[in-house]
Image (cartoon, grey):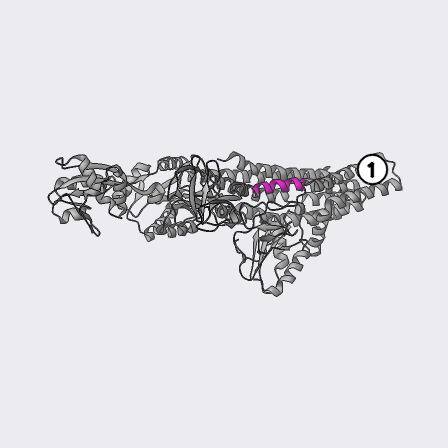
Amino acid sequence: MESDNTPPTKDSNLCCGHNHAHIQPVEQTPTEPAKSGVALFRIPTMDCAAEEAEIRHALAKLPGLRSLSFQLGARTIAIDAPSESLPEALAAIRKAGFKPTPLTNEGAGLQDDHGHGHHEHANTHFHSESAWMPQGALRYALALVLAFSAESIAFFAPATLTTSLAGMAVAAMAIALSGLSTYVKGIAALRNARLNINALMTVAVTGAFLIGQWPEAAMVMALYAIAELIEARSVDKARNAIKGLLDLTPEEAQTRNADGTWARTHVKNIAMGAIVRVKPGERVPLDAVIVAGETAVDQSSVTGESIPVDKSIGDPVFAGTINRTSSFEAEVTAIAGDTMLARIIHAVEQAQGSRAPTQQFVDAFAAIYTPAVFVLALAVAALGPWLQDWTFVQAIYKALVLLVIACPCALVISTPVTVVSGLATAARRGILIKGGVHLENARKIKVIALDKTGTITSGKPKLVATEILDTAHPEQQVFHWAADMAAHSDHPVSHAIALGLDGYQCDGDLETFTALPGRGIQAQAHGTALVLGNHRLIEEMGICSPEIEARLAVYEHEGRTITMLASPEKVIALFAVADTIKDSSRDAVAELNALGVSVSMLTGDNAATAKAIGTQAGIADARGDMLPDDKFAAIEALRTSHGCVAMVGDGINDAPALARADIGFAMGGAGTDIAMEAADIVIMNDDLRRIPETIRLSRKTHSVLTQNIVIALAVKAAFLGMAIFGEASMWMAVFADMGASLIVVFNGLRLMRSGN
C-alpha cells in the first residue's frame, strides 16, 4: 500500500457519484499488514479519484493526521493518525456520505462489514454484495417500470389533480428506489459546498420534480442508476482483471508429514520448508524449489512464457503455474500471501493507485469544467427569460438539463479504466509495470541502454569451443583430464568446462589436486603433471609461445575466456568459455530498431567482449569496462543526446543507472532484489522482447486515451449546444452522458482483449 502525504486535491468536482454501493469487487486481503498506528478501513462506495478526493477533503483537518493511503481497487483506506482521532475521522467520512468499516487482522483473517471472515491467502474468494444479485436487479428494474408508469400517466391519463398526484407518487417511488444513495451523497456534497455528480443529480432531479417535470425526473434517476451500474461493472472488470490470477492457486496441496506419509493441507497452513508433492496437470500451490523429480512447467501465468520450461532438482517453481509432465516434490520457499503471484497482484494494485499524466490533466480539467457549467446553468436560468423569450419554467428546465450534461463522468473515467486495462494486460504477459505513469511514458523512449550479463546474455558461462594443440595425447584422454580437474574447482569457468565435458569425467585418474588461487589448478594423473589455468599461469610457467598468443587473441576478440590444459613443457589444449547471447536478444534489438528506438550496451566486461556480444546482438554502440558510476554517467549523456532514455539491467551494479533513467527495466528472473526495487518495470521471464512489447502497449494505451477524451468532449460539446440553443430533454442528456461513458469504458477494455 503506497503512502501518500499529499494535501487534499481539488478534484472533488469530478464525476463518480457512481451508485456503486452495491457493487463490490472480489476483495483481496492486503498483503502487507497495517503499520503500527495505522487504521485500515473498507469503504464499499469509494472507487474513483473523485470519491478519494471527497474523503481527503473530509479528513483534511483531522488532528494529528500523518498520512492517508488509498487502494481504490480494494476500496480501502489506511489512516495514520492518533487513535483518539479515529472516531472523529469516521464521523467525518460518514458526514461526507460514505460508510467506513474497520478491517482487523485477527485470527483467521479480516472481517468485512457483514462479519464474514477473510482468510489471508491469495486464493481466497471474498464475499461481495452486488447489485447484480437478484434483489438489486429487481429493485432497479422496478424503479424503471415505475418511471415508465409515471411517463404513461402523464401522457395518457386525463390531466386532473388526482392523476397528477398519483403520477407524482409513482415518480417519487421510482426516484427513491433508484436514487437513495445518490441523494445521500448529493446532500452531503451540497452541505459541504462541493459540486460532484451526486450534487448535480440531486439538484437536477429535485428541480425537475418541483417544476412539474416529475415523469422526466423519475426516468432520469432510474436511467442514471442503471447506466452507472453497468459502467461500474465494466470498470470493476478492468480493475479486477489481474485478480483473476487468484483463481490459479489451489486451496489445498499434498504435504509430507514427519513420518513420510502424505496429507492434504490447506495452503494457508503450509509453513516455509515444508515438502509438497505436485502431480501432472496440477497447479503449484506455493513458490518452492524442486528437491525430487524432473518435469516441464507452464509458467505463463507468472512470466508470460508460452512454452513450458524444463525443471529439475534445484530449480524454482512458482505458485499458480501448471505441472505438465511428471510428479515432483518441492520445498516451500514462500508462504501464502508472499508468493511471486501474490506480490505481482499487490504491485499492480499499487500501480492502479498512481495517476498517469493524462489522468492528471483530465482531473485538473474536470475540476474547472464542472463548476463552470454550473455557473452557466445558473446564468441560463436567470437570463434565459430576458434574452431568449423563454418562460421561467423553460429556463429552469434548460438549466437543469445543463446540470445533467455537466457531469464529466465519461471524461474522467476514460483514463483510469484504460490505464488499468493496460496494466492488467502487461501483467498477464509477464510485464510488471509499477504505475500508470510508466505505462504511458514508455511510448516516449528514444534510446535504451542494455546491460550485458543476464540481460542480453544468459548470465551463465558455457563451454563453446575446444582446441587440442598437442596431438601426442588422444582426444578422449585430454578431455578426461580437463573434466576431472575442472570438477574439483568452484570457479564459474571451471564449472562451465566440467558441465561441457560431463561425459568424460573419471575421478580415478587424478592422484593429487592443488588449487592455485587466481590462476587455476594443478594435479597429477598417473604420474603426469598437469595444470588447468588462465593466461597468467601459462606465462608464469614460461610456455606461452607467439602461436599461443595469436590463438588467444582470436578467442578474446570473440569475447571468449580461455582456459588452458598444459604439462610443464607445453600447452595441450584450449577451452573457450563464453556467456552466450539469448536467442531472444537479436529479435528484441531488431524490434526496437523498427520502432525507432536506438540501442546501446553498457557492460563491465572488457571492450573486446563488449564489441563481440554487441556484434552478435546487432548493437553498434557497445561500451565495455563500465563501472556503476560510468553507467550512471552514460545514462545522463544518452538523455542529452537522444531524449527519453530507458535502462535495462539485473544486477546491483545496474541499480544506480536504473534509478537515474527515465524508465528502468529490471530482469525479474535473474535480477537482484535491489535492481527490481530500483526499476519501474520488471520483466518476469528475462525475455528482452517484452521491452518492445511494452513500448507498443504504451503507444496503444495512449491512442485509446486520446480517442476516449475526444469522444467524451465531443458528446459534451454537442449536447451543451443542444441544451442552450435547441431541444434536449433531461433523459436524453442522461442517455448521451452514460452512453459516452460506456463507450469510453468498453474502448478502454479493448486493451485487455487485443493484447499487443
Q: How many tags in the picture?
A: 1
**Relative horizontal placement of residue 648, taking residue 5 as reference (left or right):** left
Task: Name the secondary structure under disc 1.
Answer: helix
455 in relation to 306, above or below = below
> Residue 121 or 23: which is nearer the viewer?
121
Residue 152 vertical placement versus 79 (above, below): above
Whole-percent x, y for residue 280 in the image? 46, 36
Front residue of this view, candidates 52 and 686: 686
Residue 447, located in which quarter of the rendered image?
Answer: top left
Q: Is residue 724 visible?
A: no
The quadrant holding residue 388 is top right
Instruction: Give x and y (percent) for residue 224.
Output: 70, 41
Residue sitting at the far left: 569
Q: Nearer the viewer, residue 13 or 624?
A: 624
Residue farthest to the front, as pictured: 259
Q: Is residue 83 magenta?
A: no
Whether 497 is drawn above or below 92: the answer is above
Query: Would residue 129 be seen by someone viewing this image from the given angle?
Result: yes
The residue identified by callout 1 is 154
Q: Which residues are magenta?
A: 227-238
Is residue 631 shown left or right of residue 56?
left
In this rendering, position of residue 136 left or right of residue 486: right
- Identified at 28% across, 48% down, the residue is 625
Dot 1 surroundings within 10 Å: few (below 14), some, or many (20 or more)?
Answer: many
What residue is at 73 percent from the left and 48 percent from the top? 180
Q: Position of residue 144 (x, y in %)?
A: 75, 38
Instruction: Indicate the quadrant where residue 705 lies.
Output: top right
Amino acid on which disc 1 is placed: Ala
Along the line of sight, which residue is nearer the eye, 58 or 130? 130
Please state if 290 lies on the left or on the right of 468 as rendered.
Answer: right
